[in-house]
Image: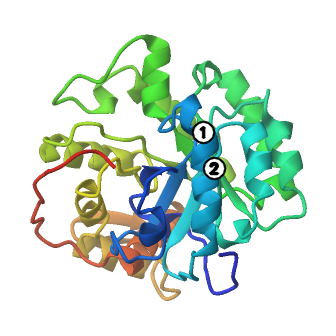
Amino acid sequence: MNTPQKKFSPWCLGASLYMPAHRLDLMDCANGEKLSALRSMIFCTEDAVSHSELDSSLRHLELCLQGFRETPQRFRFIRARNPEILARLLALPDIEKIDGFVLPKFNETNFHAYFDQLQGTDFKVMPTLETKDVFDVGAMTELRQGLEQDAVFARIFMLRIGGNDLMNILGIRRPRSMTLYETPLGHVIAQLATVFKPYGFSLSAPVFEYLDDSVTLQKEIRLDLAHGLTGKTAIHPTQVPVIEAMYSVDSGDYEMALALIRKSSPAVFRMHDAMCELATHQQWGQDIIDRQRCYGDQVALDLPEYTGALV
């Protein structure tokens, strides 16, 4: 719900779980009666819903919205299938009970079709970068310039990277036991980080689609963090605690971060056998502090086993 007590911070989403909009227990999940540990969820009307199920999924969403309760610590988004479906969603009674929308296949072509409809609302949005334009640095630069407009920028919560869609464009699939950074997408993610992050945009990490390989998942999350990505989409509830445990903060990093924001600290100092420089490390330090507030200090991972079907 768009209420003042909800503070939007990129880190507060954690591992956002996608679930189809026609999921029968959608309202229970939204209200925290099921999957109570979730920080955020995205109800999908796009890839997770076939064309033949679309109308019934929208009717189901409409009915569920009536029962959504205020959830200050849980964030609820809907992934609109396209601008036409966004219009239908915005017209639903009680739509103000969600926090915003994920905008798929986002590029210059549908920019205004999405944002023109959102004028006069309080909804936050997460455009998803997952079309062939993503491979064109010039196209991404032009898109960023459009997103930098004050009225647009204020509405953007973060930008999502659609890893599987981008892999599909290349005609490949991530091999087992390999991170995205060992595929052509590693270069693309680094490129997106350098195009968008210096201008104040947060980027979220793509999904990891294998449910039986937590070792590679953890390796990929470390690389996500090294690339400055904030949050990772989950495809199954068992991934959520693994992802969020990886966001907990090393105690040494936290001590350095606190020292970096301390006014009395020297311009350059040594701590934990690392050089700390106020002029170059303060932004990193603030990010570490934000993560620690959400996820605490590092603990040993007790990894859950995968059982059951995808949600």
The residue drawn where x is 47% and y is 38% is 48
For residue 58, the mark is: 2
- Residue most extreme to the top: 171
Q: Are marks 2 and 1 in contact (CB under 8 Å)?
A: yes
Q: CA distance from mark 2 to mark 1?
A: 6 Å
Classify mark 1: helix, strand or loop: helix
Image position, residue 286 (x, y; %) = 49, 71
Q: Is 174 situated above or below 206?
A: above
Q: Nearer the viewer, residue 98 or 232?
A: 98
- Identify the residue under disc 1: 54
Q: How many marks?
A: 2
**For mark 1, does the 10 Å Cα neighbourhood hold few (<14), some (14 to 19), or many (20 or more) residues?**
some
Image position, residue 19 (x, y; %) = 43, 51
Task: Residue type at mark 2: give it.
Answer: Leu
Q: Nearer the viewer, residue 127 or 93?
A: 93
Image position, residue 152 (x, y; %) = 81, 53
Left-right relation of 280 to 6: left
Task: Residue type at mark 1: give it.
Answer: Leu
